[in-house]
Amino acid sequence: FGTAFPWQGRSLNHLKEVLEDEVGALHPLMLCSAPGHDVSGRVEAIAREERKELNSVAMGSAEGFPTAEKLLASASKRGTWVMLKNCHLCIDWLEETLVKRLHSLGASTHRDFRIIITTEISPKLPAALLQMSDTIVAEAPAGVKASMSRFFSSIASNRFQDPVRNRLYLVLAWTHSVIQERLRYVPAGWSQKYEFMEADATHGLDVIDALVQEAAGGKAIADPDKLPWDATRATLCKSIFGGRITKPVDQETLDALVNSVFVPDCFNVNFKLVDAKDAPCLPDGSSKEECFSWIESLSSSTPPTWIGLDGSAEAARAKMISESVTSKVDQVFSSEADQ
């Protein structure tokens, strides 16, 4: 955005506080992220937790414009939330319509009204909109520990009531983080870039809750062997995460990952999450505090062996980055020489 951008140094971990206490009805909250890093799931989770009515509209085509305008007009009177998604795809509409509508908001606007804008980082975003918005730049976390910490922090507190489900949440967080971390090693981690998102893992929480509740029949499940393992693994592999995969080789990788950790043995003491010498073992307890403490104890750097790759993967990745940078520099010099 340039050196004049009003960066305030906050992350998505502050999103709830910002929405509740800092942004008002007259100023939108803009969530800027790198391409492929969708943060809308965070807003949806907070809205559910706080029981806020949230209406979302994808702004990728002209069909979304009239819908967005109707939602804004209604929500500003009723005090509900509106999320405009992928706004980097409608720069002209932002400048010609949204900015003017925001300027027209006045004292009659309901104080609980909130407008959230999600967008990829782009130099084309209207300066007027940036100036009137409260902005959070959301960077994709690097490393399994950072990814797990961010995902676990997004889980509503009222979900941590059952140690059995807590354990499954922790295994899900590990799985999600490994999937994300492998994206850094394309084509070794995955054969191509896939748009895996935090929202996938959030949907995974819902799947776990629904399947466990159905299997329990209203009673607490104390025996891990009685959990719906087959249904859980199948749903995660085929729908939640597998729904984004297009190549059989990557589906095999995902299946192997999910099938190795979503097993009754994950409730055992010292269960290793991956067959590697330095791999972490799950904690003994499964309370919310114990889960967070265990995540905090992980190494900030992620060895490739943790995510199922050979130890040489990091060197190969560094070489690929170096070659890419060299190629871009050569292109710059070649372009200057032609001029």
Image (cartoon, rainbow, N blue to C red):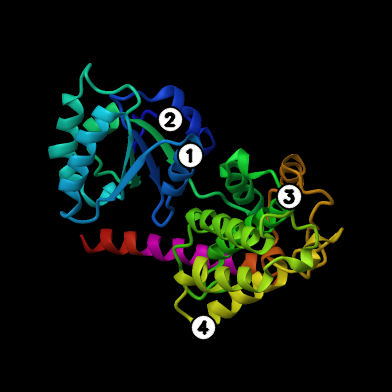
Which residue is pictured at 21% across the width and 44% down the height? 68
Task: Identify whether 262 is placed above or below 54.
Answer: below
- Mark linked to residue 248: 4
Sooner in the amino-acid sequence: mark 1 or mark 4: 1
Residue with the mark numbered 3? 299
- Helix, strand, or loop for circle 4? helix
Residue with the mark numbered 2? 19
Magenta residues span: 316-330
Q: Quadrant of residue 249?
A: bottom right
Is residue 337 left or right of 288 when viewed as pictured? left
Residue with the mark numbered 1? 46
Q: Are marks 1 and 2 in contact (CB under 8 Å)?
A: yes
Task: Identify whether 264 is placed above or below 105.
Answer: below
Residue ranking furthest to the right? 269
Sooner in the amino-acid sequence: mark 2 or mark 4: 2
Near mark 2 (Cα within 10 A), the count class, few <14, some 14-19 or many ≥20, is many
